[in-house]
Amino acid sequence: MGSLSIWHWLIVLVIVLLVFGTKKLRNIGSDLGGAVKGFKEGMKEGDADAAAQQKIAEGQTIEGEAREKVDKSAS
């Protein structure tokens, strides 16, 4: 009664397919895949934002940004 054999898992799989149907399981799988893909993209964007913040802290110019000093005594 310790572990489940391959036959137990096959019976569970058949029951799950009968209860939920293949279309619903396919939709769940695609939704899960999309969520994982979105999470990975979010992590990449977070890493890029952290690298940009680090460059700003070091005083480096980031492509697409320009900083200009404003002379306050001229006004």
Image (cartoon, grey):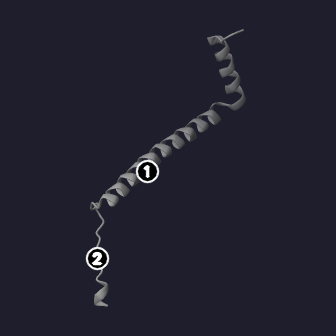
Element under disc 1? helix
- Residue occupying the point 28% across, 74% down: 68
The mark found on residue 3 in the picture is: none
Are dots 1 and 2 in contact, CB under 8 Å? Answer: no
Tell me if residue 29 comes above or below residue 4 in the rendering: below
Residue at left 72%, top 29%?
Answer: 19
Task: Give the class, few, some or many, for how many residues have Cα within 10 Å of label 1's Cα (few <14, many ≥20).
Answer: few
Q: Is residue 20 left or right of residue 73?
A: right
Q: Observer-nearest residue: 13 or 46?
A: 46
Q: Where, quadrant-wise, is the N terminus in this rendering?
A: top right
Question: In this figure, which residue is indicated by the disc labeled 1?
Answer: 46
Secondary structure category for the residue under label 2:
loop
Residue flagged by tag 1: what amino acid is it?
Answer: Gly
Displayed quadrant of residue 29: top right
Q: Residues within 10 Å of mark 2 (few under 14, many from 20)?
A: few
Q: Position of residue 50 (x, y in %)?
A: 40, 52
Instruction: Indicate left or right for 18 with 68 as reference.
Output: right
Q: CA distance from mark 1 to mark 2?
A: 29 Å
The answer to which image quadrant residue 26 occupies is top right
* Residue sitting at the far front: 73
Q: Nearer the viewer, residue 38 or 60?
A: 60
- Counting the numbered discs, the total is 2
Residue that carries the numbered disc 2 in the rendered image: 69
* Residue farthest toward the top in the current orientation of the protein: 1
Vertical comparison of 39 with 53: above or below: above
Q: Earlier in the sequence, mark 1 or mark 2?
A: 1
Q: Nearer the viewer, mark 1 or mark 2?
A: 2
Q: Quadrant of residue 63?
A: bottom left
